[in-house]
Image (tube, rainbow, N blue to C red):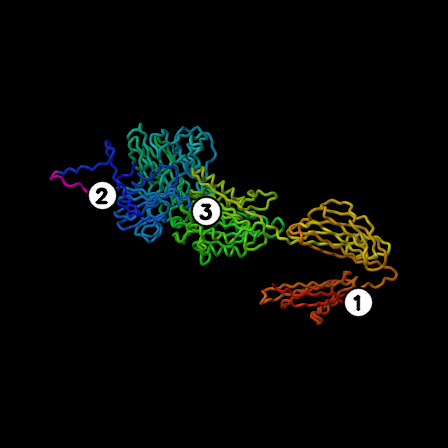
Amino acid sequence: MAARGRTTRVRAGTLTAVLAVVCLLASMVACQQPSPPPVPPPDEPPPAEPEPLDKLGALQVLLGEVLTPASSPSRVSAYMPSEPLSDGDVVSSESGARYAVEDDTWFAFIDDEPEAFYAHSTRYVFIDAASGDYEVVSESWPPEINGSSMWSAGTHNWHLIEVLSLLDSAVPGAASRSTAPKADYGDAPDGTDAYWGIPGRFPTLYATANSLRGRPGCHTVTTGQETLGRSVSAEMDATDPNDPDGVPNLVDSDSDERAFIILDGSDSRLAFTVSVKQSAPDVTRYLNVLIDFDQSGNWSTGSNGDEWPVVNFTVNVAPGDSETVITPSFAWGTRIVRFSPVWMRALLSRSTVSEGTFKRAGGWDGSGKFDYGEVEDYFAFLMEKPPPPKLVRWPPAPGLPPGGDGKKNGGGQPPPPGPTKGPCGYDINYHVIVINCGDNSKDLAQGTPIVQGSCDAVSGAAQDQGYSSVANLGPNKPGSSQTSLANIGNAFSQLASSVKCGDHVLIYICGHGREDGGIAIKDSSGRTQENMNPTDNGDADDGKDNSLKDFLKKIPACPDQDCEKPACCCHVTVILESCFAGNFDVDGVTGEGRAVVGTSTDTESWATYPGGGVYTQGLVEGMRDEETDTDDPPDGVDPQEAHENGEDSVSENNKKRGKSQEPWEDSQLCECKCPCKPDIDVDKWVWSDAEDGWVNQIEVEPGDGVRFRIEIENTGECTDIVDVEIIDEMAGCLEYDNDATLDFAGDSEDREPDRVWSSAGGSLLLWDLGEFGPLSPGEVIAIEYDAVAEEPGPNLNKATASGHCSADYSNIVVSADLALVMVYGEEAPPPAPEDVLYISLEIEAESFGDQSSCHSFVIVHVAAEDLTGGSYPVQTVSIEMNGLPWFDSGPISTTYYSKTLEFEADCGQTFDFLATAVNDEGMHVITAGSITTPVLD
């Protein structure tokens, strides 16, 4: 029906929203001035003033002309104050529009997309309380009335009337053929659970076992003449595999058209569209409604009162018309809290249901054959965001209003977010920031905070995966954890103080997006306090941390830089769950080192409760599912892998709702450079027949043969070693005897030294192993060879390995190890001190400051070793500095001793050190070193 002429004036900002009176004269194409009304005869009384529109009349206008029940299959909701607004009242929107009321006006807010984040399509409806004329204004945010939310309890002198959609919650069951007559059947559970653990005993099947006196399940034989809605299907029983709707009716899968529940304080009503075919007779129809108020699984008077609230309500609709029928008011059971969800049956028929027949049975049980009409069953949730079956235990348990018991996303231990080590061995840390920008006042009042639900789901999954939480901000949290632009900036600063280039970061931001850009930051009551914009207004930086671009600048990218470099990162994933997230697809938000995901472009983002955002539901399911990991071998689920689940979830929701939400992604992740921390380790052994294994020391006689083994391992954390070289020193009383072999990567081959030459103390063997390519961390090369004992004495055999870091060739790593062969003869001469005792001295200095103020730090490292492995233990180690005693170890007895000493000095000072080691035989060795502390230029 077209809008009627509006007489009440509502001012909207600078625009006066006054609708012109519609001229309804069919013969005219333009409005003309009406003729003066005829003067009534003196003896006729003046016409009576029309009665002001009462609450029911306002609902009839709203649901009969603006928002008719069966006009769409979409889920919508509406809210109307129980009293009209008066002159001076102001309705305002977050969009900035203001509507000043000048006459008594019924106001209604229609949410056309209650399962979406804001901003999205809404309508403000102003109904003239005197004439019933109305104006509909397109809006995108919930309203405030006189500066307060419509849902702020106690701030208004009226209560809020809620209008909620009744739609299918289809969970189709198994189909089976039946010999039942073709008719219209319901879809309430008959033999399956109605609620969790409560069997459904509703008489739905034709041959039901749950009816009084063996009556058949409720059905109407002749269909299409009068309908609840605008159409009806006929099937062969409620399990018909060839149901015209495409699926069998059971459970809640009949193609029900939208109806409304009206909650008005303690009163309840229902609103249906009733259509009568042009060819149908002009007769009275009757509407009967059953509601399982006590959630017992059948319809009868029970613990929560009479369950037949609408009894033979007369419906008079002319053939060829469709009208909105609003039932008389009734109580939703006898308890203070309305139970939800409940099973409801609505029957439109030409005949009444006999009250006498069911008087002693607690009321009509929902059974019976009816010649004409339609039967519709609904699983009625008293909420605008009913939980989807896949997100709650289904069917929900009874007695848990408003929506049954929800279950959290996931469950069990999820896979990690990725490997713990980088490709060259560095540690990868995983950081997460979750920013809850706040729910709107409507969702908070109704207990369906979709923003909070989204953030809780991501925070829980990230924690279970092993992320370290840097910040979890929310509007109802105290201090630095409360969502504000300042605290968001602080969270990013905290992240910068702990992140490294090779770490991985997840930043999840959820809130209500503005069509003109940004996300609204709301307080704990749902009122907007600030906006987080993508960038600063204009091209210039305003010098403040107040945009996402500003925050992300705190974590710059670090391509090809050291993976352990602090305060930067190559792997920052930003997920924006909001409407109009495409506003963030701009330079500065996107950029190198980041993968930015927006859950929408220039449309709404959809959500459910529980579960939160539709994209977020899929994302979290992916984070918790090891099957999401596409790496070989598996190493965990990162946000990019889980993103595909989020996209699939949105696609499925789009098909279900006929929507066009489209996530977007801009991925510019970079790679860091492995930190060059190479290391190498050498072990040298000699074979012992007595031990039947490799040992560090053996005793032999002149002429005996010995076999040595050298193992070289890359013990670095992160990088390969190249151009490995081995130099093996043999004492003079041993002689190389060939038969050298090399083992690498499971392969063995003969490999004589590349060079053998004599030195003052014996002979040197050199193997150049560059042809074996990089030696990766953990890999080992082993060399074995034979030697012959020539002369008595201790034979210290030292193997030294060296190699170059593949990431920085100038970085050389070296390691050495000893094996001892004691050759005993008739007269073994005593060993020389340097053969059994070894001392080393290392000195470093570093200067700080500038030319005017310079100081140095000197580090001295001394080490002494009994080269025999225990025959001549070290007894004392001492150091002189500049000719004076400086350090003395005191009495010791050990095969190895080391000490690091530190002191401060001025720049440009010279220090001479002399280190002495003494063993238990009184043998001593010395070494010296000098250093001049650097002078700064």
Q: Is residue 275 in the magenta section?
A: no
**Residue nearest the viewer, comparing 440 with 661:** 661
Left or right of 431 on screen, residue 28:
left
- Name the amino acid, label 2: Glu
Q: Select label 3 or label 1 by which is in front.
A: 3
Q: Which residues are magenta?
A: 41-52
- For the residue pair 666 and 156, the one nearer the viewer reads as 666
Q: Measured from the top left, where is residue 714 in percent x and y?
A: 69, 51
Q: Which residue is mark 1?
A: 921
3 or 2: tag closer to the N-terminus: 2
Between discs 2 and 1, the one toward the N terminus: 2
Q: Look at discs 3 and 2 and give the one toward the viewer.
A: 3
Side of 855 relative to 820 (left or right): left
Q: Amino acid at mark 1?
A: Glu
- Residue at the far front: name it: 937
Name the secondary structure under disc 3. helix
Q: CA distance from mark 2 to mark 1?
A: 123 Å
Question: From the image, which quarter does the C terminus lie in?
Answer: bottom right
Gap in angstroms between the C-alphas marked 3 and 1: 79 Å
Where residue 773 sits in the image (x, y, percent)?
A: 70, 46
SS majority, magenta? loop
Location of mark 3 (residue):
584
Q: How many numbered dots are placed on residues in this image?
A: 3
Q: Residues within 10 Å of mark 2 (few under 14, many from 20)?
A: few
Which quadrant is home to the N terminus?
top left
Q: Which mark is residue 404?
A: none
| Disc 1, SS | loop
> Residue 56 location, x and y as percent?
28, 43
